[in-house]
Image (tube, helix red, strand yellow):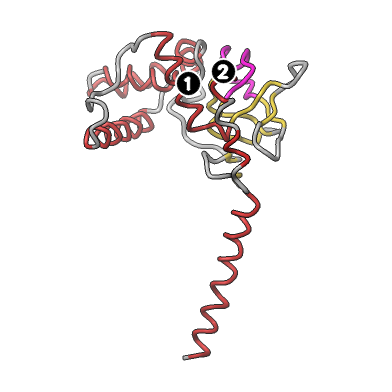
Amino acid sequence: ASRTSGGPARTYGSSPHAIAPTAAAARTRARLCERDGDHLGMKRALDEWAAVPRAERAAWCREHGLHGRALATADEVRRQLLAALAAAGEGDGGGGGGEGDGDDESRRVRRALCEGYFMNAARRMRGGGGFVTVDAPTQTVALRADDASAAVAAADYVVFAELVWAGKPRMRVASPVDREWLAPLLPRLEAVDTSRLLGAQVGAASAAPVEAKADESGA
């Protein structure tokens, strides 16, 4: 099942990752994700993979515990997005790889994540006993203890890609963000009537068979 309100889905399940659950992957995750969270860690993994000669990528992925197919898909999506930006006169159509510019890159990327994932934001509960989502209805969520980066574990506010069920809702693919980045975005949540949107969808779906039946009897 999923819980959506016009933004990224909160999905209870699992999805393929670029980083596989192995000892090699744990080392890669520690190296790439610890400082800035999962999203930037995955971006750095993609940058490193793209710099490896094509004939050597399979061996490189095994060595680092990465899923080559997921990385190839991500690379293709990145190319399509860059091409679309270039066609719209935005950016230069470059690869976006390399080391970036350190802390400045981290802040720019994580602030951009707030714009896309503010509906999947959570704040640390008082006493440090976990996190609670900021979207209504709120719910208590936890980190994935097996792969939470140090940056996410220490954050007061995070954004996440999805929730997975592992005894309780746990955030998957999460990054630390600043409260000041989220604050201007949160009023948008009040403008979204999730119940009304879902009700309209259900009503439209149930009305369709009735209308079809009426058409048949009229014919």
Residue at the (58%, 44%) spot, across then down: 5
The answer to whether 78 appears left or right of 34 in the picture is left
Which percent across, then down, holds residue 204? Answer: 56, 66
Residue at the (30%, 14%) spot, across then down: 98
Residue at the (50%, 90%) spot, across then down: 218
Residue 103: image quadrant is top left
Asked whether the residues under the numbered discs 1 and 2 touch, taking CB atoms below 8 Å apart as contact, a structural biologist would say: yes
Q: Which amino acid does label 2 sit on?
A: Asp
Q: Is residue 21 magenta?
A: no
Q: Is mark 1 on a helix, strand or loop?
A: helix
Which percent across, then down, holds residue 26? Answer: 51, 16
Residue 45: assigned label = none
The residue where tag 1 is placed is 110
The answer to whether 38 appears left or right of 105 in the picture is right
The answer to whether 83 appears left or right of 11 in the picture is left
Which percent across, then down, holds residue 203? Answer: 61, 65
Along the viewing direction, whichever of 63 and 120 lies nearer the viewer: 120
Which percent across, then down, holds residue 215? Answer: 49, 84
Q: Which amino acid does label 1 sit on?
A: Arg
Residue 178: assigned label = 2
Q: How far apart are marks 1 and 2 (CA)?
A: 9 Å
Span of residues in magenta: 143-158
